[in-house]
Image (spheres, rainbow, N blue to C red):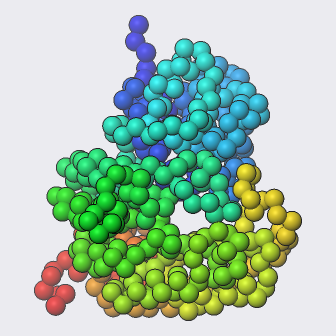
Amino acid sequence: MTHLPRQYHITTFGCQMNKADSERMAGILEEMGFQWAEDPEQADLVLYNTCTIRDNAEQKVYSYLGRQVKRKHEKPDLTLIVAGCVAQQEGELLLRRVPELDLVMGPQHANRLRDLLEQVFDGNQIVATEPVHIFEDITKPRRDSTVTAWVNVIYGCNERCTYCVVPNVRGVEQSRTPEAIRAEIEELGRQGFKEITLLGQNIDAYGRDLPGVTAAGRHQHTLTDLLYFVHDVPGIERIRFATSHPRYFTERLIRACAELPKVCEHFHIPFQSGDNAVLKAMARGYTHEKYRRIIDTIRRYMPDASISADAIVGFPGETEEQFQNTLSLVDDIGFDQLNTAAYSPRPGTPAALWDNQLAEDEKSDRLQRLNHLVSIRAAERSQRYLGRLEEVLVEDQNPKDPTQVMGRTRGNRLTFFTGDIAELKGQVVPVRITTVRAFSLTGENVANPLVCA
């Protein structure tokens, strides 16, 4: 008797690490014979890969789950999985709230999905949230793109920022070996990928846990060494990395980015607050002066580099004057892009227990004022692109205009231009910029190189 292949659907919330984990879990499911279903209502296995950085992401998971729980009552062989950071944080509690779940698994267990599912199919309800050593990855992720790919280089985080749940849910830092990382990138190069982004929750910590010290007493394996080690992989044309921590960001790393032609001139370095007392309360381990020096150094080596960052407003105890210090940092630096958030207390973090929490309306007022300044400064930064020739790596069709394709400049600026996706996907195209907006550009394909002179 022939069975139709079982179908699966994964919904991903949150950061690039989660997207990378989802691609890996999709790869495992396809090796197990599952097929991707665009519509979760048609799937036999539904997996929510969750994020706990903000409260609303968590609430969303529960509302999505509600719909699938109803389905499960009608279709008992539906397999329901919650993975990722909410799973890690809530663990058994999730099963109590949603007893219909088959599997609750933390992010460190992504590579073990097959083993865990085999236990589920034997009739067990599983919670996998205990800390594990992350085995070297041999699964083949199902990549969402055929042009750009994420490559994990370090899992976990040893920082103890007072607002953040990541160390609790993603465990201690574990670096992959340079050889394993290079092997994965070589495979991506053979498959035709053009751009990779090296990923870590705190990527500048890469290699600290690997054995080996140079004669000068420096760690033998650092992010800078890794960039030199993987830089010449055939087929890969661009290399990015994220997310950086100002405490560990070195001039040696900046110099490597300036020297290595494949490394893009784009840096994502969260500052979180422009006020030293708030930074201290956050346990970030640097001052706003140090942060400004990093940006000055980057601009000394690469005047045109794009800088993006993350910022939190309304941290417990933040005064109006301290918030003004964040505004002045944003005004002085002029970010190309800034991810902003109003502080939301996360369970199990020190700051959530403090009694100097700010009122919600105060937080949202500050967020609005910050966002307003960000878009003004980003629009000003965009002006430098007008009339310029930019190399755009074409990733996809413009979903709003099928006559256009879209891709990114080396500085990570989203750019649209007229063209045929079938012909241009994965190509690096010279584009003359004709329209600039705060966060994206439009231009025209200057296919004839003589025109570029």
Residue 146 in the figure: left or right of residue 309: left
The x and y percentages for residue 412 are 40, 73
For the residue pair 17 and 354, the one nearer the viewer reads as: 354
The x and y percentages for residue 334 are 52, 88
Q: Residue at x 50, y 91 (%)?
A: 380
Let me know if residue 357 appears in the view.
yes
For the residue pair 368 and 270, the one nearer the viewer reads as: 270
For the residue pair 435 and 411, the one nearer the viewer reads as: 411
Tag count? 0
Q: Residue furthest top?
A: 1
Q: Residue at x 34, y 66 (%)?
A: 218
Residue 453 in the figure: left or right of residue 81: left
Residue 144 in the figure: left or right of residue 276: left
The x and y percentages for residue 135 are 40, 37
For the residue pair 215 and 226, the one nearer the viewer reads as: 215
192, above or below 140, in the image: below
Q: Quadrant of the N terminus?
A: top left
Q: Residue at x 67, y 44 (%)?
A: 89
Q: Quadrant of the C terminus?
A: bottom left
The x and y percentages for residue 50 are 60, 46
94, above or below 387, in the image: above
Let me know if residue 11 appears in the view.
no
Q: Residue at x 56, y 48 (%)?
A: 170
Q: Quadrant of residue 252?
A: bottom left
Q: Residue furthest left?
A: 450
276, above or below 170, in the image: below
Q: Quadrant of residue 103?
A: top right
